[in-house]
Amino acid sequence: MHILVINGGSSSIKFSIFDAASPDADPSVLLDGELSAIGTANARLKVGEGDARAVEAKSPEDAIHVIFDALASSNIPAFEAVGYRVVHPGPKLDRHQRITEDVLRDLEEATVFAPLHEPEAVALIRGAMSRFPQVPHFACFDTVFHQTMPEEATTYPIPLSFRDRGVRRYGFHGLSCESVVRQMNAAGIKPVRMLIAHLGSGCSVTMVVSGESVDTSMGLTPTGGVVMGTRPGDLDPGLIFYLLRQPGATVDSVEHMLNHDAGIKALFGVNDMRKLREAWPGDDPGDKAETTIAIFTHSIRRAVGGMIALYGLDTLVFTGGIGEHDPLTRSAIGSSLLGGEDMWNPNIERSANVGQGHGLRKISSDASPYSIYVVPAQEDLVIAVHVARMLADSP
């Protein structure tokens, strides 16, 4: 059985084809690729190990046809199902499921909760379903993993009329968190209290107790929580009112700013941790790069510290693009858990932290009171696993 997984973002689409031949083993990757810079003149497509090439992809609908045309020209067997990462299910959908017209209508209604991600996801799904109507299509949601959170962690103290409409804390990056739990379990590592720091363009901190999510930093939408690439994280609600009162401001303009022009981009000018690290440390204390990194790491430290104060800690896991590839961020956060200020705190084994190994690896020292791991996010694999299970359960 071959499964195509589509993981779409606001301006890029990652895709993979998995072979799910055995129900007793994880699906294996046959081919993967990415279409980046969608909607710009610099759109590029990379398939497998080949070099990226320029393509024309002005919209998600264009993008999905570019990807399917590229897959058709490869020597990959035809796929029998398509699975999608969908950020927000809205209040009506509470599980991974096969996509029908009713499901698509529910997803379209949910765009008010995730305007940065949902419209593109729906457009991708509609484009793919029109291209391949004969195969089943499945949605896998970033929120499902967090449905184990208790009421005190999900409820907003606002009038019941809004709570009845589904206004609550959903949590996101659930597919990433689930992939971390699966990999840790496969390695025989089963901490009772595990804190997962998913750090990338989007960032979140999730506490997992005995394999289940009990609390996470993101809320109703993926905009809240810690500082991110283009999103600010948690803000004083009064700041939103202030922004809306500015001359020419509209709900749409403020929403666009908070989703696309805030966070690291607002502080440093671009959303690129590599360029940020190249500029740090600067010649003068308090320069833009230094200030941006300090604000970013302080935000994560505060979220991490709050989770530990509530639940304790056995194991800290870093995942996501920054979490997996930026040792300085890992050091700044890992060292802070005992009040340390040294970037190379004894809690972290320096050589293991600096190394860019593949797969799950431990980076904490023997002296550390908690274990620290780097674990790759395997969202696409988790989607393939769920799709294979749903196919097996389908009539």
Image (cartoon, rainbow, N blue to C red):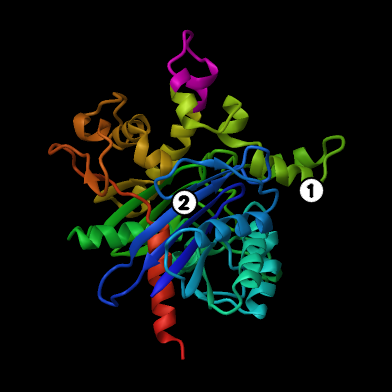
Image coords of residue 213 (percent x, y): 39, 62
Q: Nearer the viewer, mark 1 or mark 2?
A: 2
Disc 1 marks a residue whose amino acid type is Val
Asked which quadrant contains residue 301, the reply is top left
Q: Nearer the viewer, residue 57 or 167?
A: 57
- Identify the residue shown where x is 37% and y is 47%: 319
Is residue 216 located in the magenta-colored stretch of the structure? no
Q: Which residue is mark 1?
A: 251
Q: Which residue is mark 2?
A: 33
Q: Nearer the viewer, residue 326 or 349?
A: 326
Mark 1 Cα within 10 Å, few/some/many (few <14, many 20+)?
A: few
Q: Which residues are magenta?
A: 278-292
**In the rendered image, the vertical position of residue 22 relative to residue 169, given as above or below:** below
**Side of 274 where 192 appears, left or right:** left
Image coords of residue 381 (percent x, y): 38, 62
User: Can the viewer see residue 320?
Assistant: yes
Image coords of residue 181 (percent x, y): 31, 60
Residue found at the very far right of the displayed protein: 248
**Side of 342 where 381 appears, left or right:** right
- Identify the residue shown where x is 44% and y is 24%: 277
SS label for mark 1: helix
**Side of 286 where 312 appears, left or right:** left
